[in-house]
Image: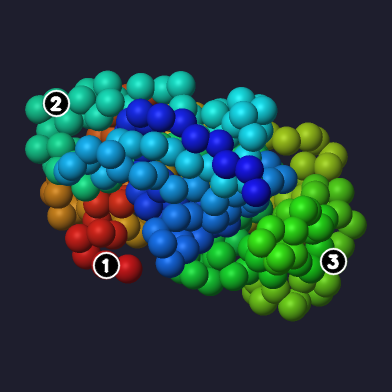
Amino acid sequence: MNEYIIENVRDFNPEHIFDCGQCFRWNRQPDGAYTGTAMGKTVTVRLDCVESGRIDKGRLIIENATEEDYEKIWRSYFDMDRDYGLIKEELSREDPVMKEAVKRGSGIRILKQDLWETIVSFIISQNNNIPRIKGCIEKLAALAGERLEDYRGEAVYGLPSVEKLASMEAEDLAPVRLGYRAPYLIKTARMVKERGLPESYEQIAALCGVGPKVANCISLFGLHNLSSFPVDVWVRRVMSEMYGFDEKDVKGMAKFADERFGDLGGIAQQYLFYYIRLTKGE
């Protein structure tokens, strides 16, 4: 199996990236590597650290990828051309909370994910925990998605297309056990089939079953709008404990994030989300 290796990678840690709530098709392996499916491909990613004390710097190894795959898919997907070192410096300046959060999640990067997959994933994510979200997504893919290239002897499926989901009824998704989310997915697929994929937060928020938190997640992870600041239960908690907000003051948190973090709000949100889950547990 092919391996593509990039030397001297900085500000990249698979655990930080894949366990910070932004994606649901990546899973940790016994050796600490992560295997995931994205953009129709399945790969395993690991970082061999070459400098003592640095868990976000080293040799990046992508198994089942060629140089062409890297240039066409993974370079953009992993946001490799953005200087996260400078971003961490800017966010940490005169903000001790962010300084500590950045330290704990120093290898986070915002993935440039497929927009449709992001829409499906975050509709499923509503009022759900991460293990169950992952399970539902895999069941949905196996039920209605296209079979992709097998990986390590295992069958792999992509998520169902807009057209496929739009042709189904909510009852067809019963084996996935999505509950009230099933009709949301079907109606959203039909809306997207008719109107095309959303191009703004407002268009995302108009989709069936999409509230402000999910709309911000889709905007951040699907449109790569880095100013989006999703506020979920964990972000409410960190904003309350670390910045003194009332946990119900979501508007106040969003306003604060806009003023404090500006166009880097989404990246700040990921550091904060990872930090509070790391320190308080799920």
In the image, which disc is placed on residue 124?
none
**Residue 95 in view:** yes
Distance of label 3 from label 1 (alpha carbons): 37 Å
Residue type pointed to by label 1: Gly
Q: Residue at x 62, y 29 (%)?
A: 67
Residue 249 lies, in percent from the top left, at 28, 49
* Res 232 → quadrant: bottom left
- Colouring convention used in this rendered image of the protein: rainbow
The residue indicated by pointer 2 is: 93
Q: Residue at x 80, y 48 (%)?
A: 162
Horizontally, is 19 left or right of 180 in the view? left
The residue indicated by pointer 3 is: 169
Residue 98 lies, in percent from the top left, at 19, 38
Residue type pointed to by label 3: Glu
The residue indicated by pointer 1 is: 281
Residue 163 lies, in percent from the top left, at 86, 49
